[in-house]
Structures are given as structure tokens and as C-alpha cells.
Amino acid sequence: MYHITKANVYITVLSVIILSCSGLADKKMSTSQENSAGYFMGGAEANFTMGDQESVKVFLDFIDKHNQKDFEGLRKLISDSISISGPRGEFIKGGDAHIAFLKDWFATGDLNWKPVWGTSVKFPGSGDANSVIGVLDLNIKTKDTLMMVNQLIVAVIKKSKVDAFWVHERQFTPVELESIMASAQSVQ
């Protein structure tokens, strides 16, 4: 016959806690492994993981400030040492240089970015930085033309500021442009 004593209760409760914690640790580890993927330079496994939503919010605010031509608000969102690599070999270093570049560029026409999709990832060894990978459609209206391009932007977010970004750009195909125009007309 089995007698229930305080010692038996403590041992049972302690055993359940230990087993539960080890199960959670295994589950957390396997979830982390399941949610990490990627490669880095030359195909070496990198195990990138999901970043945070706060970085996505900073990135979207950054894009919105561009659309609003809000240079003061934009300056508050970028680090003093920001570095930018553009799609045609442009390289800009520093917050003030970025704002000066934008003022010149915006004087050439009406530019507007429309976010399509994006996510935040954490690179191995990146410390407190997250990277946002975002795809946007850029419309550039000048006096006589409307140019539409698709951009992929990788932005590094540190301490709630954009610290660096790289812009990759491609032209839309005629089929894509036709679909975009048809979609825009159906909305109107």
C-alpha cells in the first residue's frame, strides 16, 4: 500500500516541474531551429531568425516620412552615421547627407512609395540590430511621365533608428504594368 506523505508530494511536484521545464526547453529549442533558416556568403548555413515587429514599424514610419517629405521627422528616424547604397551605385554616408540627397531628388518630381510586403530578420551576430527586408513600389511622376519601379530594400534598424539600407530596383514588365494600371482603374 502506498502512503501519501509530504515528502512524496514534494518529490512528485518537483518531478513534474523538472519534466515540464525540460519539455519546454526542448520545444523552445526545436521551435527556434524550425524558425531559423538561411545561408551566408558561399552557402554557409546562417540560421537567420525572425526579428521584431518594432523594427518593421520603424521601417514603415521611415517610408511614410519619405512620402510626406517630412525631413525633420525623417532626420529623427535615421542615425547620424547612416550609410545608404542605392540601386545605381550611389553611396551616401551620414544623416545630413541623406536629407540633402532627398531634397535634391524630390525636386525632380513627385515620388511616392507603396509598401507591398516586408518582414524583420535577425542576422547571426548582429547584437541588438534587426534587419527589415521590404518590397515597395515606387511611382515617380514628373511633368510628362510616370515611371513605376519595384524596389527591394534591406534596412538595418538599431535603437529604433535606421542605421543603414541597401536599395535594389527592377523595372516592371509590360504585363505587370498592365495589371497595375487595370487594378488602379478598378479602384477609381
Image: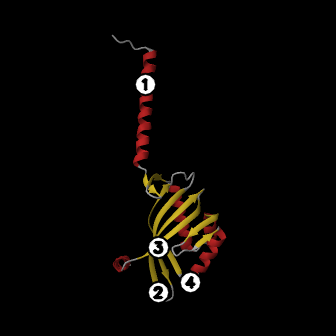
Q: Looking at this rendering, what residue extends furthest in the front direction?
A: 42
Instruction: Please name the residue that numbered disc 1 is placed on.
Output: 15
What is the spatial separation of the Cα atoms under label 3 and label 1, in whole angstroms? 58 Å
Give the Cα distance between marks 1 and 4.
Answer: 70 Å
Residue labelled with disc 4:
108
Name the disc covering residue 145, or none: 2
Residue 80 is left or right of residue 90, and the answer is right
- Mark 2 surroundings within 10 Å by alpha-carbon count, few (fewer than 14), some (14 through 19), many (20 or more): few
Q: Position of residue 101 (x, y in %)?
A: 61, 76
Residue at image location 51% in from the left, 85% down from the top: 142
Which kind of residue does numbered mark 2 sit on? Thr
In percent of width and height, residue 67 lies at 53, 73
Discs 4, 3 touching: Cβ within 8 Å: no
SS at mark 2? loop
- Quadrant of the image containing the C terminus: bottom left
In front: label 3 or label 2: 3
The residue at the point 42 percent across, 46 percent down is: 33
Task: State the CA–CA distance, disc 4 to disc 3.
Answer: 19 Å
Q: Residue furthest bottom?
A: 144
Which is more N-terminal, label 4 or label 1?
1
Please, what secondary structure does the residue beneath circle 3 have? strand
Disc 2 from disc 4: Cα separation: 12 Å
Q: Which residue is mark 3?
A: 169
Distance, label 3 to label 2, CA atoms, is 19 Å
